[in-house]
Image (tube, rainbow, N blue to C red):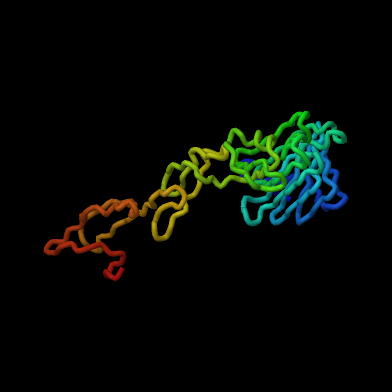
């Protein structure tokens, strides 16, 4: 069972158990995979060092929260970064429970938050389950206002949308990179997903790649990205970089020599003057074919 790590590299755990949904709700100390659409109505309990892989095309839906016990750690992974196919985790906390993290104050260790990591390309949506504002449960974190939040770690490429919309994404908005974890803990709703770098500052490296200098929503600055050139505009659709076209010259039997040239046609650059000279003749134009039919 493969997964993509925080550096975008494909990895494979030694063993991986497939989750079935229903009553199979206690997991711990191992690797687990979601391979289809499954659901839990009575919540999930996580103990020990636990890793969860969201396979492509799969969705795990939990309507009573994922309680990560105090000394446990839950790390969530996915198999790819394709928005159309990547697996998803959707969690609604139960009464006075965090979506992911602390359970109920009177039942689950006082609602203490635990250790949660969302890595690689995972797509996670979580709602707190508090029935009133007094409870102040976290989307990802504590289960009660007097409990600690626990720890939350997000890989650098993650974007977080968070808000106070109870059981909805209303009023949510992207968070600044240094506020991502805090937003998940202090709001009822949080959506964590790989960032596609909207409104980012880009700079050019060469004809093939550019880099994200500073993204407003994640910490993935400096990652190389391939240009996406428009066929007609000959400019990158992301950073507006003008495509360079390399031209080589052939005298077609005429004496002379010319070096290769790289032109940005979108910037209005033109070929340098002709250096092929044929006595008694006047240069007319360049052509892509020897017989002039190009």
Name of the residue lying farthest toward the left: 280
Locate residue 48 relative to residue 197 in the image: left or right: right
x 74%, y 50%: residue: 1
Q: Nearer the viewer, residue 28 or 288?
A: 28
Q: Is residue 71 visible?
A: no
The x and y percentages for residue 7 are 61, 41
**Can you say whether 134 is above or below 3 in the image?**
above
Locate residue 118 relative to residue 65 in the image: left or right: left
Quadrant of residue 130 within the rendered picture = top right
Q: Nearer the viewer, residue 277 or 89?
A: 89
The x and y percentages for residue 207 are 41, 48
x 83%, y 52%: residue: 21
Q: Nearer the viewer, residue 168 or 210?
A: 168
Locate residue 283 relative to residue 45 in the image: left or right: left
Quadrant where the image shows the C terminus: bottom left
The x and y percentages for residue 291 are 27, 70
x 29%, y 71%: residue: 293
The x and y percentages for residue 79 are 68, 50
Locate residue 31 relative to residue 81 in the image: left or right: right
x 58%, y 45%: residue: 195
Q: Is residue 49 visible?
A: yes
């Amino acid at each position: 069972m493969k997964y993509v790590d925080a550096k975008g590299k494909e990895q494979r755990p030694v063993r991986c158990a497939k989750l079935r949904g229903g009553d199979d709700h206690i997991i711990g100390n191992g690797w687990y995979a979601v391979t289809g659409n499954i659901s839990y109505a009575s919540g999930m309990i996580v103990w020990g060092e636990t890793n969860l892989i969201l396979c492509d095309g799969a969705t795990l839906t939990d309507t009573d929260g994922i309680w990560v016990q105090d000394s446990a750690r839950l790390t969530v992974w996915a198999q790819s970064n394709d928005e159309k196919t990547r697996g998803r985790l959707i969690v609604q906390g139960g009464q006075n429970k965090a979506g992911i993290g602390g359970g109920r104050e009177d039942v689950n260790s006082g609602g203490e938050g635990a250790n949660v990591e969302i890595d690689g390309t995972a797509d996670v949506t979580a709602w707190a389950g508090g029935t009133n504002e007094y409870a102040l449960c976290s989307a990802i974190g504590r289960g009660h206002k007097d409990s600690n939040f626990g720890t939350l770690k997000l890989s650098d490429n993650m974007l977080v949308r968070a808000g106070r919309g109870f059981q909805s994404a209303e009023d949510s908005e992207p968070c600044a990179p240094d506020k991502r974890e805090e937003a998940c803990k202090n709001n009822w709703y949080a959506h964590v997903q790989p960032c596609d770098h909207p409104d980012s500052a880009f700079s050019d490296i060469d004809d093939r790649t550019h880099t994200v200098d500073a993204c407003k929503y994640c910490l993935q600055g400096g990652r190389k990205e391939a240009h996406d050139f428009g066929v007609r505009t000959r400019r990158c659709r992301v950073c507006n970089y003008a495509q360079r076209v390399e031209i080589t010259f052939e005298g077609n039997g005429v004496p002379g020599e010319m070096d290769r040239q790289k032109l940005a046609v979108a910037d209005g650059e033109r070929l340098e003057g002709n250096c092929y000279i044929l006595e008694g003749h006047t240069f007319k134009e360049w052509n892509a074919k020897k017989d002039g039919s190009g």
